[in-house]
Image (cartoon, rainbow, N blue to C red):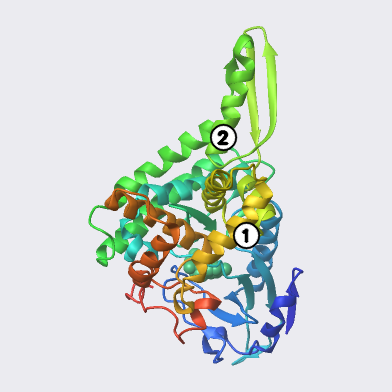
Amino acid sequence: MRFIFRPPAGDAAGLLTLPWHEPLEEWKDDRLLEMPHRGISRHVVRFVEADGHIFALKEINERLARREYRLLGQLESMGMPAVAVLGIAVERGQHQGLELDAILVTRFLDFSMSYRYLFSNRYASFPEGKLVDAMVELLVRLHLAGLLWGDCSLSNTLFRPDAGSIEAYLVDAETAELHPTLTDGQRDYDIRYAAERVGGELLDLQAGGLLPEHVDPIGIAMELPQRYHALWDELTREEPIDPGDQRYQVTKRVERLNELGFDVDELELVTAEDGARLRVRTKVGVSGHHRAKLFALTGLDVTEGQARRLLNDVVSYRGHLERKEGRAIPETVAAHRWRAEIFDKVLGLVPEELAGRLAPAEIFHEVLEHRWFLSEAAGRGVRTTTAARSYVENVLPGLPDTLTPAATAQTDSGVDPLGDDGAA
Ligand SMILES: Nc1ncnc2c1ncn2[C@@H]1O[C@H](COP(=O)(O)OP(=O)(O)OP(=O)(O)O)[C@@H](O)[C@H]1O
Ligand SMILES: [Mg+2]
């Protein structure tokens, strides 16, 4: 066997002792995990825990494995929301006279969920519009980067809660092609294909009785292209600029793009006889302002939406401290104190067996939401720690588990057997 990988891979050394010379389907090993809520796939896909990390293994033809390995690596360097690839195993020897296929190893996307899991769980009440928006944003980002996906579907996307919203990640790049730029025709192909697949996948869920009543598969499928075009237009349109109002217009446009989660790479003002026009080039990678700021201030590494939420809480805590202590407090000091006195204290109330339900920052976000509900109900402000205790007692135990080292350490199967509905 030969294992080709992208550094750093020091955390994956334990993988080398897996039974690579056997067909993946037949592997028996304590480190293998059941993943009941994964998407539907043609290939054998299994999950394994090694040295505290979870990896996804997909058995696939060597040529395709090498392609997908290379593409996922390129997407990662561009900062695209996609699963991170670790490596490929090739030359695994023969089984019953036939060469074994290669195995592509990707890093399991922590706290991620498949659409089937989303719809069949608590997230059933999640506005499905946000799911479509997340997918559309992913597709637009990939297209801006020149990636023709060729197989955009709910099954090939992973979802992750993001402070009341949801993030979508590409999980399957088998058919994808990277070009310098895409033509309208290429983009159109991807959009149409996506709409068809999404409609079909939702109809399947509906037929299996797994879709909440109010969700309309055809309506969603038809909305997808509209939402795509609206976002694409916002990001790429050229607009006439009024010279007297230029600064305001440029600021407005940049702000709007930031709001949509995109950063501006370059602005271009083109003057012609019929007036000036503003052209914008957006950065394709995921916007990371808030993420980077929160990390620098507190050492917490979270998603962009979570970071925005947590930073707001840091600001309000700073205000609270300044009022209480009657002096100005620097942002860095306030952030450190917030981390120790608020964030860590709240997370400290979460018992170990519930820690795998949601990412820590997502739990914190939910506690803040819960505090708001409790305060409304009580007609007065409720303390964060009070809200946290109530959340841990009344809400968190009702949430489904996700596949994380924290969760799997608790129980053997780790997760409830949802998703085994025969549709896979
Ligand atoms: N790194 C990962 N993290 C989390 N889940 C993953 C990961 N890799 C794969 N999965 C899960 O496994 C499922 C199947 O993976 P994938 O789509 O790559 O397989 P496939 O057989 O190539 O699919 P297709 O039938 O579309 O060709 C995904 O839908 C996803 O739910
Ligand atoms: Mg797939």
Q: Which of the pair 71/391 is nearer the observer?
A: 391
How far separated are the C-alphas under marks 1 and 2? Answer: 25 Å
Ligand 1 under 8 Å from disc 2 Cβ: no
The crowding category of the residue bearing disc 1, from other C-alpha atoms within 10 Å (few below 14, some 14 to 19, many at least 20), is some
Q: Is residue 372 above or below residue 18?
A: above
In this view, the residue farthest toward the left is 213
Of residues 181 and 111, the one nearer the viewer is 111
Q: Is residue 340 visible?
A: yes
What residue is disc 1 on?
300
Three-letter code for the amino acid on which mark 1 is drawn: Leu
Residue at 64% x, 25% y: name it.
Answer: 279
Residue 2 on image: x %, y %: 75, 81
- x, y percentage for residue 145? 64, 45
Dot 2 corresponds to which residue? 257
Answer above or below: position of 123 versus 48: above
Residue at 65% in and 46% down: 331
Q: Nearer the viewer, residue 88 or 17?
A: 17
- Is residue 158 something that shows in the picture? no
Q: Is residue 231 left or right of residue 129?
A: right
Q: Position of residue 124 (x, y in %)?
A: 32, 60
- Pinpoint residue 341: horizontal percent, then vertical percent: 56, 61
- Circles 1 and 2: CB distance less than 8 Å? no
Quick check: 281 above or below 220?
A: above
Which of disc 2 and disc 1 is earlier in sequence?
A: 2
Tell me the SS state at disc 1: loop
Looking at the image, which residue sits at the far front? 326
Name the image quarter holding the N terminus. bottom right
Residue at screen point 59% across, 59% down: 339
- The quarter of the image holding the C terminus is bottom left
Q: Amino acid at mark 2?
A: Leu
